[in-house]
Amino acid sequence: MNYSISDAATRAGISIHTLHYYEREGLLHVARASSGHRRYTSDDLAWIGILTCLRETGMPIRTMREFAKLVQQDSSNIPERIQILEAHRLEVIEHLAALQHNLEHVEGKIGFYKKVLAQGKTQS
């Protein structure tokens, strides 16, 4: 099945602007109908899902371009793809640990302020 750019953006949960950006950056190559309109396939949507995941987990656009270039080639470069993804995974794990630490700090502050409120109510 083929999708218009609007349908593809809706299905992928991203904006049309983001799809154009992915094309400009060489991350996505989309076929065009005889009318010149972009036509997205299910495979394109799956690839957009991967790009969205990489972007949302903080992969730099430069690294995304490198990964996309490898994917567009033959499968002889799978070790290089794995290397990129493993390096990214380590960065994501580090980011999650930092977020967990910060969440604990925020939860501590919430607990502190709740105690302050509880003490203020018992004193009045």
Image (cartoon, rainbow, N blue to C red):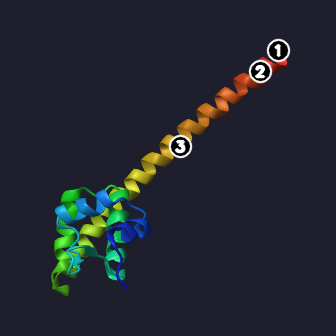
- For the residue marked with disc 1, what is the amino acid? Gln
Is the residue marked by circle 3 packed among few (<14), some (14-19), or many (20+) residues within 10 Å? few
Residue position for label 1: 123
> Do the residues bearing badges 1 and 2 touch, measured as CB atoms within 8 Å?
yes
The residues bearing labels 1 and 2 have C-alpha atoms spaced at a distance of 6 Å
- Residue 84: x percent and y percent? 24, 68
Residue position for label 3: 103
- For the residue marked with disc 3, what is the amino acid? Leu
| Residue shown at the point (60%, 38%) measured from the top left | 107
Q: Which residue lies furthest to the front in this view?
A: 35
| For marks 2 and 3 on the same chain, the one whose residue lies earlier in the sequence | 3
- Residue 79: x percent and y percent? 21, 79
| Residue shown at the point (36%, 58%) measured from the top left | 15
| Residue shown at the point (16%, 72%) measured from the top left | 69
The image quarter in which residue 10 lies: bottom left
Is the residue marked by circle 2 packed among few (<14), some (14-19), or many (20+) residues within 10 Å? few
| Residue shown at the point (29%, 69%) measured from the top left | 85
Q: Is residue 103 above or below residue 117?
A: below
The image quarter in which residue 41 lies: bottom left
| For marks 3 and 1 on the same chain, the one whose residue lies earlier in the sequence | 3
Residue position for label 2: 119
